[in-house]
Amino acid sequence: MKARRSYEKPSEERARRKQEAVRRSRKLARKQAQREGLLPKSGRSR
């Protein structure tokens, strides 16, 4: 996701990768719920 410019400790890299995986899975679940009509479409109408 975010380009790593400098050294990253292995524990921090593991934590970052896990966070990114969680973020991706939540996003996919949200998109699928929107397709199934469980959630309203994203975007705010004013």
Image: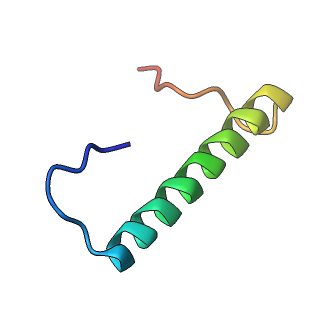
Q: Is residue 23 above or below residue 12?
A: above
Q: Is residue 28 above or below residue 19?
A: above
Q: Position of residue 14 (x, y in %)?
A: 45, 70
Who is closer to the viewer here, 15 or 41?
15
7 left or right, relative to 24 = left
Q: Position of residue 5 (x, y in %)?
A: 15, 49
Quarter assignment of residue 39 = top right
**Callout count:** 0
Q: Quarter of the image for the N terminus: give it.
A: top left
Residue pictured at 18% horizontal, 64% vertical = 7
Residue pictured at 85% horizontal, 31% vertical = 36
43 left or right, relative to 37 = left
> Which residue, as the protein is rendered here, is positioned at the far top?
45
Q: Is residue 30 above or below residue 46?
A: below
Who is closer to the viewer here, 34 or 40?
34
> Which residue, as the protein is rendered here, is positioned at the far left?
6
Q: Position of residue 41 (x, y in %)?
A: 64, 26
Who is closer to the viewer here, 29 or 5?
5
Quarter assignment of residue 37 = top right
Residue pictured at 46% horizontal, 26% vertical = 44
Residue pictured at 48% horizontal, 54% vertical = 20
> Which residue, as the protein is rendered here, is positioned at the far bottom?
11
1 left or right, relative to 2 = right
Q: Position of residue 26 (x, y in %)?
A: 63, 51
Q: Quarter of the image for the C terminus: give it.
A: top left
